[in-house]
């Protein structure tokens, strides 16, 4: 059995209690012992890069590995199993399959999101969650994954992408398919009720599926039907589902989108806080940025987005339909200074990544915003990403002041190299954990040990992830060694591929997976696991 000692560090154990000087001894995949020591006494030093089985953590904190409570790395774990952007900021567990889009099941018309499908290519061999697990285990990821089952993926597997309601027969098929995927290791159900095709469902459909998840001991996480104009009504829909099914539920990436909705934040927080205190909601997650990141085609009118990318491409190929789409986009009243192009997928559009639509229009006179958006999406096969600056900094501070908010990147893992390095992601893929810690401790004055708890034990306990999120004897040895004064994001919207600073070492299930500052920081430990509910 392999052993590892982390000596001379300051242990902040994830409980929320103050930290203390101690050495941590790991045997196999578990914490064997935590030995407090006087602050004035140092243990025999080890190496910063532990080839000897001893990590010298002098001057650093030793904490549980961080839990990314809302992630989208399902497919990319097969491509980049080291999860570089996540591991380098101390993340050891991701909660994937969010916003209604999961890596499985994939039957009927169901397709993975455009970026996943384009990059996976011939590696996309699975249909069921059980088959995905087999592929993932062969890839040997270096982080743990909790896998939810997405409502949009279920619905497209049974009903397709058309704008129609479920029938009793298709509802039964979706519920049976969900039950099979839960039995294969799915953690619960997620929804993305602003996306195709989940937006065509009614509350009865989602409630029926949530009832199945609850019966299997599963959880529910929801990108609600509205995060803007109808946000209060959307929260009521979530609460009605919880009361009808008894499921344990989380609201995803809490925000009030659009300046006209910023004033609703106090009513939103009051409503959710009351539900949390009453035991009806588990809480929410939120990334520490004020720009959302999603597909650029969300600016399409609803009718133009029906059927997802293949149908969108067909509409763009028809001149009359394309002109109608462009005209409706132009008439939408959007402030194009607040919409930036994200990841692009062709040589014709690469130069637009990171630039606002307004900036591009100024440089390329003659086209309207609608036609420019149509041209970019057509060149990229309707896979273009976008950043949408529609949130308030003051509201973010109010949200982070709630003790039931935990960090969720809302991002897939990324790497500065290989197929993922050609993308232009949101900086949250690399910087969520240091930014969350900075905002809580420096902007809001939250005690550092309380901030660490919200990054570790709180999300682990919320989602029933046993033996993780804490440093104690017998716990799984997921550990981050980092320096709080140096812990910082270096990723920006212009240059997003940049690792976080201040992380010395990350251990996953007892093996060193990341060594910050080393010539080869990623050890390819491959000790991450598909976690069982």
Image (cartoon, helix red, strand yellow):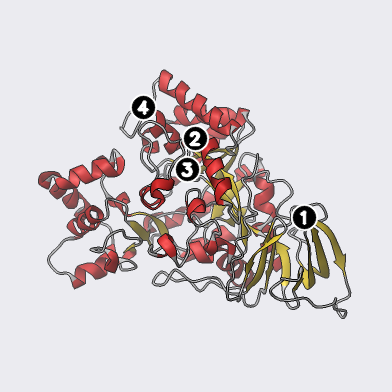
Foreground pick, 415 / 358: 415
Foreground pick, 485 / 41: 41
Which residue is under mark 3?
Answer: 103
- Residue placed at 26% from the left, 63% from the top? 349
Q: Is residue 357 visible?
A: yes
Query: Which of the two discs, 1 and 3, sits closer to the camera?
Result: 1
- Residue placed at 51% from the left, 65% from the top? 430
Cα separation, mark 4 vs mark 2, equals 24 Å
Q: Is residue 79 left or right of residue 41?
A: left
Q: Residue 262 location, x and y as percent?
A: 43, 57
Which residue is under mark 2?
Answer: 128
Cα separation, mark 1 vs mark 4, equals 51 Å
Secondary-structure class at tag 2: loop
Label located before the other in sequence (3 or 4): 3
- Residue placed at 56% from the left, 59% from the top? 82
Q: Is residue 427 left or right of residue 64?
A: left
Query: Which of the two discs, 4 and 2, sits closer to the camera?
Result: 2
Which residue is under mark 4?
Answer: 165
Q: In the picture, which quadrant includes the N terminus?
A: bottom right
Label located before the other in sequence (1 or 4): 1
Q: Are marks 1 and 3 in contact (CB under 8 Å)?
A: no
């Amino acid at each position: 059995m392999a052993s590892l000692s982390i000596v001379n560090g300051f242990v902040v154990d994830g409980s929320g209690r103050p930290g203390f000087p101690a050495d941590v001894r790991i045997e196999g995949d578990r914490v064997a012992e935590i030995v407090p020591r006087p602050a004035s006494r140092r243990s025999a030093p080890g190496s910063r890069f532990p080839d000897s089985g001893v990590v010298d953590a002098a001057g650093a904190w030793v904490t549980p590995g961080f839990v990314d409570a809302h992630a989208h790395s399902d497919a990319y774990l097969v491509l980049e199993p080291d999860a570089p952007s996540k591991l380098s900021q101390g993340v050891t567990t991701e909660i994937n399959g969010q916003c209604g889009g999961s890596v499985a099941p994939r039957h009927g018309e169901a397709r993975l999101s455009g970026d996943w499908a384009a990059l996976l290519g011939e590696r996309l061999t699975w249909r069921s969650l059980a088959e995905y697990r087999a592929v993932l285990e062969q890839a040997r990821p270096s982080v743990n994954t909790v896998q939810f089952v997405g409502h949009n993926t279920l619905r497209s597997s049974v009903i397709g992408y058309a704008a129609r309601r479920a029938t009793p027969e298709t509802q039964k098929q979706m519920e049976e398919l969900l039950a099979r995927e839960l039995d294969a290791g799915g953690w619960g159900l997620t929804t993305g009720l602003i996306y195709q095709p989940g937006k065509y469902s009614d509350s009865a459909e989602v409630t029926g599926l949530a009832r199945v998840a609850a019966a299997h001991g599963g959880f529910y996480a929801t990108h609600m039907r509205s995060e803007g104009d109808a946000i209060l009504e959307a929260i009521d829909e979530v609460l009605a589902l919880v009361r009808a099914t008894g499921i344990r539920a989380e609201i995803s990436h809490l925000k009030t989108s659009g300046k006209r909705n910023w004033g609703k934040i106090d009513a939103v927080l009051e409503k959710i806080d009351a539900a949390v205190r009453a035991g009806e909601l588990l809480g929410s997650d939120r990334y520490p940025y004020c720009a959302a990141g999603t597909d650029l085609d969300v600016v399409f009118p609803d009718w133009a987005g029906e059927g997802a990318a293949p149908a969108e491409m067909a509409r763009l190929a028809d001149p009359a339909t394309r002109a109608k789409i462009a005209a409706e986009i132009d008439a939408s009243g959007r402030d194009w200074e607040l919409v930036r192009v994200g990841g692009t997928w062709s040589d014709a559009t690469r130069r637009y990544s990171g630039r606002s639509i307004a900036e591009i229009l100024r440089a390329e006179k003659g086209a309207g915003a609608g036609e420019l958006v149509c041209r970019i999406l057509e060149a990229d096969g309707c896979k273009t990403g976008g950043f949408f600056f529609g949130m308030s900094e003051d509201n973010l501070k109010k949200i982070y002041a709630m003790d039931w908010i935990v960090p969720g990147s809302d991002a897939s893992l990324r790497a500065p190299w290989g197929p993922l390095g050609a993308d232009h992601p949101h900086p949250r893929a690399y910087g969520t954990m240091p930014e969350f810690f900075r905002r809580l401790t420096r902007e809001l004055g939250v005690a550092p040990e309380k901030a660490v708890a919200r990054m570790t034990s709180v999300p682990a306990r919320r989602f029933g992830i046993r033996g993780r999120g804490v440093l104690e004897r017998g716990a799984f040895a997921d550990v981050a060694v980092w320096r709080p004064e140096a812990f910082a994001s270096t990723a920006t919207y212009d240059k997003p591929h940049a690792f976080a600073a201040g992380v010395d070492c990350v251990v996953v299930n007892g093996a060193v997976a990341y060594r910050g500052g080393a010539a080869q920081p990623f050890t390819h430990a491959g000790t991450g696991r598909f976690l069982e509910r």
